[in-house]
Image (cartoon, helix red, strand yellow):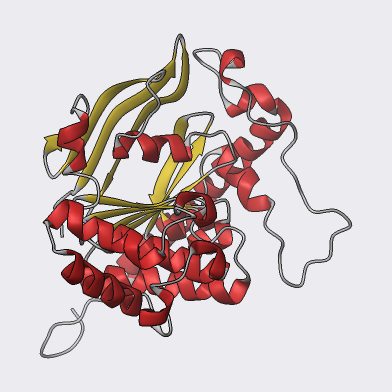
Amino acid sequence: MNEVILDVRNMSVALGPHFAVKDVSYQIKPGEILGVVGESGCGKSLTSLAIMGLLDKSLTLSGDIRFGGRNLVGLGEKQYQHIRGEGIGMIFQEPMTALNPVMKVGDQIAEMFIIHENSSPKEARDRAIEMLKQVHIPYPEKRANAYPHELSGGMRQRVMIAMALACKPKVLIADEPTTALDVTVQAQVLDLLEELRETTGTAIQFISHSLGVVSQISDRVMVMYAGRVVEIADVNEIFDNPQHPYTQALLDTIPRVGVDVDRLPAIPGSVPPLDQRSEDYSFRDRCPELYDSYLQKAEKRNHQRQATKAAQSDSALQQPMFRQQGGAT
């Protein structure tokens, strides 16, 4: 499908004179999963909150956020309430703090149907139980009466997914949905998101610190650093042939099976605070030697790939041509 459901153009988020997110542009199509990676402080979650219209009043939003062709920037709160849940859903970073601790999880899901679809309390309750079934929570009728603290981390995350999907949004933003989950539960959550993408055609913006997780679930990957998009490409291209030095530095921190090292690689320094980022700040300002080294590696890889393609093209041209009937020409 060539249709674009979410189109972000030159979006910036500023705190006074300082930019937390600067000139971010990307698109997501229906049924596509876009992975978003980067260190803490790179603007991943802030980008998502801007899309959801949940920025703090101290922040200034500019640029375009087009959902289904409609620009969301500048919408009032009442207008945005019709977008959230029904158009764009979000799985927040930490379910224990995102869920209401004094409200049963079934009631929290049912509230989505009451507010957005004017369902009766009984109908909303029945649909909430159905949503718990959809996200594979065992004994959903019983779990609907549980409080968040009575559920495991994996179950709480499933409740968050159920809430986000209750009104069948066209876009789902998953902000680190597998953080702090063991690998078994993590795999179950990823399988669930894949299943929902395939059955509903929902577009997913998947935010994660884990490049391994992103490689499993994403169609494309967007790499952010210091509030800017430094690279965006097909998932295989990102992992096989990263172009930006920051992307290469992130990939080098992944432990390799069968490779023994005394110390795991780490990126020196940290993402600078807003007031220490100049207008033209880049990853090179943080790690100049590392930046130049990775840039040279990328240029060398690109040269080798171009040479390989040229050799393959020459080889194909030298192959004998055959007629459909008869012998060689």
Tell me if residue 133 comes above or below residue 240 in the rendering.
below
Q: Residue at x 25, y 56 (%)?
A: 112
Q: Please identify the quadrant where the N terminus is shown.
A: bottom left
Point out residue 258 in the picture as x, y percentages from the top left corner. 76, 72
Q: Residue at x 16, y 52 (%)?
A: 116
The residue at the far top in this view is 17
Tell me if residue 255 comes above or below residue 142 in the rendering.
above
Q: Nearer the viewer, residue 52 or 65?
A: 52
Q: Residue at x 25, y 63 (%)?
A: 166
Which of the 4 image quadrants contains residue 49? top left
Residue 183 seen anywhere in this rendered image of the structure: yes
Q: Please identify the quadrant where the C terminus is shown.
A: bottom left
The residue at the far bottom in this view is 326
Point out residue 186 in the picture as x, y percentages from the top left corner. 54, 70
Point out residue 39 in the picture as x, y percentages from the top left corner. 59, 41
Which of the 4 image quadrants contains residue 273? top right
Residue 230 seen anywhere in this rendered image of the structure: no
How many numbered marks appear? 0
Point out residue 199 in the picture as x, y percentages from the top left corner. 23, 74
Tell me if residue 174 comes above or below residue 120 in the rendering.
above
Q: Nearer the viewer, residue 200 or 157?
A: 157
| 22 horizontally vs 53: left or right | right
